Image (tube, rainbow, N blue to C red):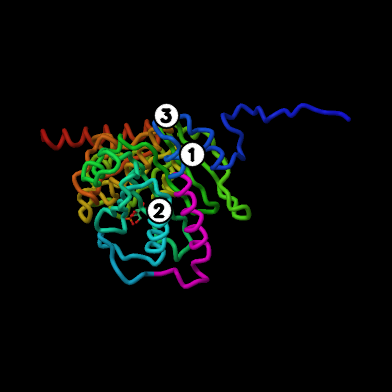
Amino acid sequence: MKIITYQPDESGLAYAVGTTLDRFIKLKQGDFPFASGELSQLLRDIALAAKIVNREITRAGLSNIGGAFGQTNVQGEEQQKLDVIANIRFIRALSKGGEVCAIVSEEEDSVIDLQNSSGKYVVAIDPLDGSSNIDVNISIGTIFSIYRRKTPAGSPVLKEDIMQAGREQVAAGYVLYGSSTMLVYTTGCGVNGFTYEQSLGEFFLSHPTIHAPKTGAIYSVNEGSINEWEDGIKHYITLCKERGYSARYIGSLVADFHRNLLKGGVYLYPATLKNPSGKLRLLYEANALAFIAEQAGAMATDGVQRILDIVPTDLHQRTPLMIGSSEMVTEAGKMISAFTEKAMYS
Ligand code: P6P
């Protein structure tokens, strides 16, 4: 009988593509000494909810769960049926998982106290971002941030557990429900992407150790608001056009961010007359993507300061957002400050 020695794939990848998410989480668990498996379990809980939401989305057109729910959320935005369904699914998964003490959701006016005082973590989530795209079959996403609570386990959840700056995140990620469904996340030790294999019901490592190009030739912004922008933004976008960059904006932050992260590019949602503090929310949109961006070598600012340094004062506060390749975000920021100074001294 001939016995041969198994030669594992030594393709130089830190982890062979094809590793399941569950196995990857176990392999990486040693990266955070203080967690004895709770954060790993929490990530699995999020992945489970993502699988369920993915199933709902892929059959939305067939099961009468597309379209408007008939109510507006705390943002004053018309809720889609799938906004409500996704919100319920993630809250239920996080509640049953047992690792979370409180949730901040775009779809909830107030903090949800899960009455689980032993839970060490707080989750801020946009259950379904870009949901107005659902009915026209454009990619949408889930965005989440994970924080350790500040107050001791066993005590009531307090404001200090919730209103933490983005730099305090212990993990963050997004799910992109697109041509394929992907989960991309970081625990502060790099960014890894997993692609969902529907037939097996598993996420498999497909994009190990994502690094964003330092620059790119793609800019993402809603140019319909051009007349509402400050001069520095107008000048930067004009510069992008003069350089022949491609305009790519599909109205779904997760999709635009993901493409720019992989290919190089910058997404901008500046302050406008309609949204003087910007449209995107700090706690459950900007912070998570900013953490991922920085972990992948990219950047995220509000045009002036690092997103992750902003200390929140309101649960649903909004922020201008410039996020993507570091050289592009830096250049946009320089334009803004140059024109701000010019305006101050003219
Ligand atoms: P506008 C979706 O509502 C969202 O929050 C992001 O996903 C997207 O990039 C942006 O708003 C689109 O906003 O004002 O350009 O339609």
Query: Range of the magenta residues?
Result: 43-67
The chief SS type of the magenta part is helix
Q: Residue furthest right?
A: 1
46 or 226, which is in the foreground?
46
Q: Nearer the viewer, mark 3 or mark 2?
A: 3
Tag 3: residue type?
Pro
Is residue 318 found left or right of 327 in the rendered image? left
Mark toward the start of the polypeptide (2 vs 1)? 2
Q: Residue at x 51, y 48 (%)?
A: 182
Q: Is residue 205 above or below residue 228?
A: above
Q: Is mark 2 within 8 Å of ligand 1?
A: yes
Image quadrant for the C terminus?
top left
Which residue was labeled with disc 1? 262
Mark toward the start of the polypeptide (1 vs 3)? 3
**Ligand 1: which quarter?**
bottom left
Give the quarter of the image for residue 8.
top right
Give the quarter of the image for residue 93.
bottom left
Q: Residue furthest left?
A: 345
Q: CA distance from mark 1 to mark 3?
A: 30 Å
Which residue was labeled with disc 2? 252
Tag 1: residue type?
Leu
Q: Residue at x 64, y 29 (%)?
A: 11
x and y, in percent, of residue 163 in the image: 23, 43
Marker disc for residue 33? 3
